[in-house]
Image: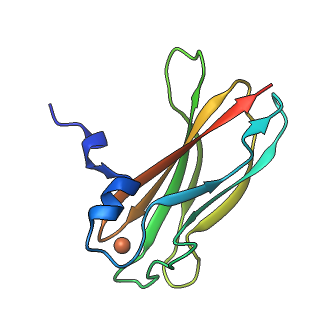
């Protein structure tokens, strides 16, 4: 059986690609957090080298999932940000609360170049 995960690119693919623009979502968040206390998470595509933002070529959405330590079934959906091309930029900041140490995953979708992912670990005290 084919798996959609096999179609998700990450930073390693970006280094091999012949693409000028970057697609890997960058996640900005603290490395440590307190349980059940909200902190800001920012996900941005193309911070250093802006990705095109045209109807013909744009980042269509950003989604964020949480893999919670010890949870029987992961991931948990945390946020979805739908982006209208040309007007909104592919960047979102939102408050996130974690109960346990977790891995936060961001997915970004380019209408021409597919799904790209990244992740960070956040330790919860
Ligand atoms: Fe693209």
**Relative vertical location of residue 27 with respect to residue 100 in this rendering, above or below:** below
**Relative vertical location of residue 89 with respect to residue 82 in this rendering, above or below:** below
Instruction: List x then y, in percent, for residue 103.
Output: 58, 34
Q: How many marks?
A: 0
Residue 22 shown left or right of residue 69 in the figure? left
State the colouring used for the structure image. rainbow
Quarter of the image holding residue 47? bottom right
Instruction: List x then y, in percent, for residue 45.
Output: 52, 67
For ligand 1, the image quadrant comes to: bottom left
Instruction: List x then y, in percent, for residue 30.
Output: 75, 46
Q: Which residue is depicted at the point 47% across and 82% down?
A: 53
Residue 68 shown left or right of residue 57 in the figure? right
Q: Is residue 116 visible?
A: yes
Q: Is residue 114 visible?
A: no
Quarter of the image holding residue 112? bottom left
Q: Which residue is depicted at the point 25% across and 43% down?
A: 6
Front position in the image: 29 or 80: 29
The C terminus lies in quadrant: top right
Residue 59 shown left or right of residue 68 in the figure? left
The N terminus lies in quadrant: top left
Quarter of the image holding residue 71? top right
Instruction: List x then y, in percent, for residue 69.
Output: 60, 21
Residue 70 shown left or right of residue 34 in the figure? left
Front position in the image: 75 or 80: 75
Q: Which residue is depicted at the point 59% across and 77% down?
A: 88
Q: Which residue is depicted at the point 48% across and 79% down?
A: 85
């Amino acid at each position: 059986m084919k798996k959609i995960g096999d179609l998700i690119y990450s930073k390693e693919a970006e280094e091999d690609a012949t693409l000028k623009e970057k697609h890997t979502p960058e996640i900005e968040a603290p490395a440590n957090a307190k349980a059940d206390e909200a902190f800001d998470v920012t996900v941005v595509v193309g911070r250093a080298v802006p990705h095109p933002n045209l109807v013909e070529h744009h980042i269509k959405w950003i989604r964020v999932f949480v893999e919670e330590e010890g949870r029987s079934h992961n991931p948990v959906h945390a946020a979805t940000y739908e982006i209208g091309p040309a007007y909104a930029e592919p960047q979102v900041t939102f408050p996130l609360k974690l109960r346990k140490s977790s891995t936060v995953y961001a997915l970004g979708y380019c209408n021409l170049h597919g799904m790209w992912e990244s992740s960070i670990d956040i330790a919860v005290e």
